[in-house]
Image: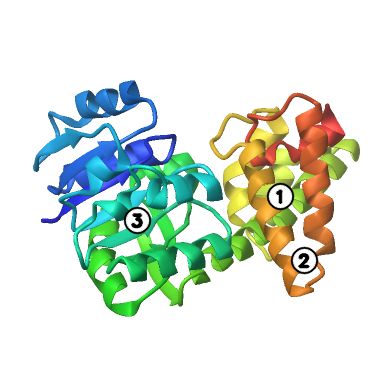
Amino acid sequence: MATVAFLGLGVMGFPMAGHLAKAGHNVTVYNRTGEKAEKWLETYADDAAGELYTAPTPAGAAADADIVFACVGADKDVAEVCVGEEGAFSAMKEGAIFVDHTTASADCARTMAVAAQKAGLAFIDAPVSGGEAGAVNGVLTVMCGGDTAAFEKAEPVMQAYAKSVKLLGAAGAGQLTKMVNQICIAGVVQGLAEALHFAMEAGLDAKAVVDVISKGAAQSWQMENRASTMIDGKFDFGFAVDWMRKDLGIVLSEANSMGVSLPVTALVDQFYCDVQKMGGNRNDTSSLIRRFRG
């Protein structure tokens, strides 16, 4: 079992760190608000096979860790917990590995990888897919970029909360793969929203229609898991519109720097902006149908 740290106990990080504790690792957690760290400790103390601690700073959490995991908000938050005042890099022991599960820019990943190397550390960008339910159930998909040797040491530990962990290339490759993931989701959810709206306007039993077409080429994860709730107007299923807009902003910025046109993604990003204007900031991503149904 490893000695690890986990920085950031939000919707995703809280259960992910919990899976590490239940897997028998010694875990020290840090959160910007210390009360959340104490709550985490209380939640998992009885199920832990290893030792659990909290720390008041990223550096304090990282000092003795073989692997430091993080899941924070955006590029600036990654920089803060890595190289900011009392950041983890300043305290990590030589040869330790930093695994960043934040969905951030590829430039952020590359910058942190260089900083880690200068400090005698390894850095893996490892954004995840699967949402809150995937984190709670320990079945996330983890997309990684970084050094092969470091990945091979970290991958067995990540298995505590993942169903799939794959190295896609050098630093930044994990973040680029997550961008591909979000491009796919945006287009599929918009197509599903339009299809369901059309079915209902045509007077069809939309759920019966989904039951039929989900057995054929139209089938998708979104159809299987979100079509019924979209029809019912229920949008409280994890990954929020605000977060999706953050991710699509990263996608579109990267595409612009590459000179790549993403017209559908850009359009769907604006549709999510419409949902925000309707007060749907915390609705899940399937709420695109609200633009049609109110």
Where is the N terminus found, in terms of image quarters? bottom left
Left or right: 55 as drawn, with respect to 273: left
Seen in the picture, residue 16 relative to 42 is either above or below; the reply is: below
Corner quadrant of residue 208: top right
How much space separates mark 1 and mark 3, taking CA atoms?
24 Å
Residue in the image at 47% along x and 51% along y = 79
Three-letter code for the amino acid on which mark 2 is drawn: Asn
Lower sequence index among marks 1 and 3: 3
As rendered, which of 151 and 23 lies closer to the eye? 151
Q: Residues within 10 Å of mark 1 (few under 14, many from 20)?
A: many
Q: Secondary structure at mark 2?
A: helix
Residue 210 lies, in percent from the top left, at 69, 47
Instruction: Give the alpha-carbon distance from disc 2 to disc 3, as whole Å.
Output: 32 Å
Secondary structure beneath disc 3? Answer: strand
Q: CA distance from mark 1 to mark 2?
A: 23 Å
Is residue 64 rendered to the left or right of residue 263?
left
Residue shown at 67%/61% (left/top)? 184
Amino acid bearing label 1:
Val
Front position among marks 2 and 3: 2
Give the total of numbered labels: 3
Quadrant in the rendering for residue 289? top right
What colouring style does the render use? rainbow
The residue under label 2 is 256
Label drawn at residue 189: 1
